[in-house]
Image (spheres, coloured by chain):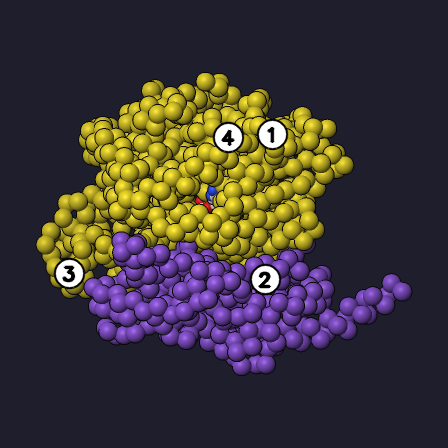
Chain colours: A yellow, B purple
Amino acid sequence: MTGLEAKIPEGPLENKWESHKFSVRLVNPANKRKLRVIIVGTGLAGASAAASLGELGYQVDVFTFHDTPRRAHSIAAQGGINAAKNYHNDGDSVRRLFYDTIKGGDYRSREANVYRLAEVSLNIIDQATAQGVPFAREYGGLLDNRSFGGAQVARTFYARGQTGQQLLLGAYQALMRQVKTRTVRLHTRVEMLDLVVKDGRAIGIVTRDLVKGEIARHSAHAVVLATGGYANVFFLSTNAKASNTTAIWRAHRRGAALANPCFTQIHPTCIPASDEFQSKLTLMSESLRNDGRIWVPKNPGDDRPPEQIPEIDRDYYLERRYPAFGNLVARDIASRAAKRVVDAGLGVGPLKNGVYLDFADATTRLGRRTIEERYDNLFEMYNRITDEDPYLVPMRIYPAPHYTMGGLWVDYNLMTTIPGLYAIGEANFSDHGANRLGASALMQGLADGYFVLPYTIGDYLAGLLNEPPVPTDDPAFGPVEDEVGDRVRGYLATGGSRTVDWFHRELGKIMLDHCGMSRSAQGLEKALSDIPALYEEFKTDLRVLGTGEELNQALERAGRVDDFFELAMLMCVDAREREESCGGHFREEYQTEDGEALRDDVGFAHVSAWEWTGDAARPEVQNEDLVFENVALTTRSYK
Amino acid sequence: MNVTLQVWRQKGPGSPGAFKTYQVDAISAEMSFLEMLDVLNERLVNQGEDPVAFDHDCREGICGSCGVMINGRAHGPQPGTATCQLHMRRFPDGSTIVVEPWRAAGFPLVKDLVVDRSAFDRIIEAGGYISVDTGSAPDANLIPVPKTVADTAFDAAACIGCGACVAACPNGAASLFTAAKIGHLNLLPQGHAERWSRTERMVGVMEHYFGSCTNHGECEKACPKEISIDFIAMMNADFLRAKLANRRLAAQYR
Ligand SMILES: Cc1cc2nc3c(=O)[nH]c(=O)nc-3n(C[C@H](O)[C@H](O)[C@H](O)COP(=O)(O)OP(=O)(O)OC[C@H]3O[C@@H](n4cnc5c(N)ncnc54)[C@H](O)[C@@H]3O)c2cc1C
Ligand code: FES
């Protein structure tokens, strides 16, 4: 097993990044032109990294399975992006953003990484604004902010309800500018299906062209995975349909450790499923909790329409249980509370699978005009999906899988346990601990891509001057390409009776029941016997029609679902071994008397980094102990 | 509810295509249009027939992947709505629905309902950006932008790049797409330095791939983000001025 070396720089927290930047080796411009970097993914992390490395003069090859880089899942982010600008003089600072993020993550992330994230948050807003990202502005023409899930200062920058879209377009445009200057070569509708490692270093990837089916080899001095999260392991999630784990899972099988895979975020405000054909769940921005009040009827079986239920028969359960934060408690807390009331039979809506998010009081207090200004696009989206008008009837919401804090283990330089392989954005595990705060994923993706990786990758590449990339006819590529081809042909040859989506849906149900918002040793054991059984069926009873030499979307999904199966087992093992409750990971056995999460800082203040052993149900683990020198570990309280 | 679909099936760019009729029974009115296609595909595979290929990803109207002609209209009957946001409750029980790919010379067919929209990337590449290298930006509040300007720039920036404007245009023109990006960047003070060169270059590439605009206005009606054709007027004005401005700039260096 590889030793875990986080490579956190010495010195006081405030100086670590500054002094690290000074100590890394630089590459002169003439040499940069000879160094090749592969980047997989064009979301916020991948597009910003590709643009920045191209500007620096490296030769970049960037890959996406989408038809254009602008379609990456990042496009869907709604609410906003955090930065410690303190433009509003309300007491924000780098230190406070750092503190809130560490605390929000329930003390399961690295101090040094999080501090750096808070520091570079300032540059991100400057960069995006200069690119023309149309952030919301006040009448004086300066930037506006709002406060967002769990924060007591207004530090969230936003662009209507389309912050991710606008930030991604900024990064995409910067990327296309480099494509024009030929520093970046763009490969669209091409999917990475494996990683190539030689003498312990990442040297390239094997891909499949999704239109022609051609399997190809690509080599480089370093490989960067910016391939996003894996919440689609639950089938129903807020993620885009194609988001998947293949890139990081294949890297894991080639030796990269996967950290905290069970840390998933279930977002509290999504539209509940309407029927068994539901294909994905739609997020309603968390900003709605700033003005909406969450409630359920006090009595099970109260079928009156919401407006006819008098105050006395309503339970505003978040306000009741968490008077200090009320409806603005952190996501994991809000989600579990909703599950609890729905499980107790208090759910609302035709399928009794939601809770109310009510704007009646806010409309009376602020007037309909203000509510329209703040939320009109969200209300319209809700109306379009449910055919109900939230100006008249309360919204119905329920939690849904949304984000995965776990991911490839990376050191302070964002390098995985395979030298030369980097992971950035949601694909790594780095900054959010056991729970991610709202508006901080966009911040992390762009921090990694614009401001961290461009420095740290130079240090590695500086060691490879005068070495051409390993040629693609090197013997290291052959077996990997053969394996990829066998896998693709295998799905087509199975000739069974069930579709890929059927298997995916069934896997999702097992995961949601046993490895979702609430977990127990018993449930996880059950999942660990049900998943392999279903996986066996997948291998023998899958039906994929058509050929491998054409656009074949079911074939693409087969490979992704195959990898989800193995990842699901690892998630359950990780959840079983983490015998504490922290952040989004709630173990029923570890809770306080009033049902709050019970963390165990003596036994579990560490990162669990798992290594592939060849048997998905029996991985090996190494722990990276988390050292807290600047914050005191307290119990998160929103009461 | 039950519907009858007439779907365009075509193996690839070189193969012949034709409509095929499918009866899709026992679906729910609460389903989205794409969920209905999922059900069709699930049933087709169970019967041993190739599923229908269509592009989609976010399924919430923001990524711009989806988009088909539904009964002759880009993205179907509901204004301001992408195909993925359309629900079956918009169709009467028992309807016949004709489903085709975007048809435009600038968007070659890939398979069934999937087309190649990469010409849009070429237009952006030509100048749809503000040239600012990472790290060189001044503090974000250094340049105030009047709220009305920022808001109008946003209206244009809301484009999702789906291509409905091109598909709806009788000439297969890409003016609304191009104008939206030019409008977004040219309105903002940050974008002024490259205003004239950007306009000239983007319009040039647009004309290389797509037809000419003759002001039909179909694009605006089809746009799922309801982007106004006023931006086309702005683009045309800027294009004329760019011709002059760029020449004058060049003259300074003579
Ligand atoms: C509905 C929604 C709303 C959100 N709102 C917010 C918000 O308001 N604020 C916030 O901070 N965060 C938000 N998030 C989270 C945030 O959007 C994501 O975490 C973030 O955008 C992930 O960016 P990324 O660059 O890491 O990956 P992604 O954007 O997921 O990009 C992944 C890229 O990798 C490519 N790819 C993946 N695998 C392969 C492969 N094998 N081969 C080739 N290409 C591949 C894809 O094509 C894509 O280009 C939201 C998330 C959702 C789902
Ligand atoms: S699937 Fe993304 S816009 Fe329709």
Of the two numbered discs 4 and 2 in the rendering, the one whose residue sits closer to the viewer: 4
Please tell me which residue lies in front, A515 or B118: B118
CA gap, disc 3 to disc 2?
A: 55 Å
Quick check: marks 4 and 2 in contact, CB under 8 Å? no
The amino acid marked with disc number 1 is Asp
Label placed on residue B119: 2
Chain at numbered mark 3: A
For image coordinates 14% across by 55% down, the residue present is A313
- Pick whichever of labels 4 and 1 is earlier in the sequence: 1
- The residue identified by callout 1 is A474
Dot 1 falls on a residue whose secondary structure is loop
In the picture, measured across the screen, residue A619 lies left or right of residue A460, that is: left
Please tell me which residue lies in front, A435 or A153: A435
Dot 2 falls on a residue whose secondary structure is helix
- The residue identified by callout 3 is A309
The amino acid marked with disc number 2 is Ala
Quick check: marks 3 and 2 in contact, CB under 8 Å? no
